[in-house]
Image (cartoon, rainbow, N blue to C red):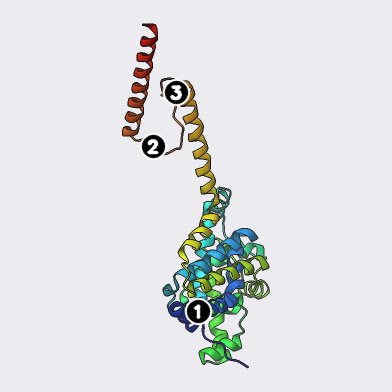
Amino acid sequence: MATLEPDLILLDRYRRTRDARAFAEIVHRYAGAVYATCHRILRDPGSAEDAAQETFFRLMTRPQRVTSSVGGWLHRAATRLALDIQRSEASRRRREAEYENLQSLEASTWAEVAPKLDVALAALPEEPRELLVRHFLRGESQAELAAEAGTSPATLSRRMKDAVDALRQEMLHRGLSVSPLVLFKLLSQNGVCGAPAALKLGLGKMALLCRAHEAGIRLPASVRLIRGLISAPRAVYQVRWALAAAIFSLLVALLGSRTLSHIQIPHGPAVQPEHRIDADETMTARNGERLRAQLQIAN
């Protein structure tokens, strides 16, 4: 049986040499856990895929930020990104406010636990958080974790119980009460989740970007293009503003600046005073030329 390379060694090799295979192996190990984290918070497959891809994109561009645990860093980054997306959606703000005002509820289903789980996990100290993430969200057995830590299964089981209790307390602070037995059962049944095919395809393309960078092809331009496509609403706004400005300019040309001088297009970039002065001077010069031509015709 081949021994798997530790995560930090893979990440260090990618950081130093941009080894695409090392990055692809990290993606293979953690894609499902990262996607599941985003999905538990956002409850939408498309938004969860976007957040998961952005999480790995940040790892790809900033590998030096990971110093202790690749899995822990990915979980925290995915949690923060998913929460940012959630807060940016106006339809979610009312729901968040309602959650803040709820009295402590006794949870018994995964639908009740899942929205609070990752926020509570992210608030835990590193050791219990890492233990819970690896066992419940990545599916590593307690025997494997005990062997890696060089401790007995009994000791590892005790640490796991303490970590679950700490997680329960964090969830209680957020208005949700759940018994240890119910929480352990729900985590065991629902924690591990495979990444969807579309996300795997997108992450495969990201690995190709790594290979392009490894081969000496300039990567930043491609990355900026991808990120520009992701932020399409901003591009739509810019196109809409450009069309409005063009229509306004056409009206000015047809009707004259005096007629439309009091009209302003809202939400657009401010017109600098010197630009207005130049426009007035140009129109004055044109009116003067027109008047001289009319006088010559009259004479």
Mark 3 neighbour density, 10 Å: few (under 14) some (14–19) many (20 or more):
some
Closer-to-camera residue (236/292): 292
On the question of residue 123 being in view, the answer is: no
| Farthest residue, direction top | 299
Callout 3 amino acid: Leu
In the picture, which quadrant includes the C terminus? top left
Residue, disc 3: 260
| x and y, in percent, of residue 17 in the image | 45, 79
The N terminus lies in quadrant: bottom right
Q: Position of residue 34 (x, y in %)?
A: 57, 70
Query: Label 2 sits on what residue type?
Result: Ala
Secondary structure beneath label 2: loop
In the image, which is nearer the foreground, mark 1 or mark 2? 1
Between the C-alphas of marks 1 and 2, the distance is 48 Å
- 56 to 91, vertically: above or below: below
Task: Name the residue that disc number 1 marks.
Answer: 19
| Mark 2 crowdedness (10 Å alpha carbons): few <14, some 14-19, many ≥20 | few
Q: Answer yes or no: do the residues labelled 1 and 3 have beta carbons within 8 Å?
A: no
**Residue to which mark 2 is pinned:** 270
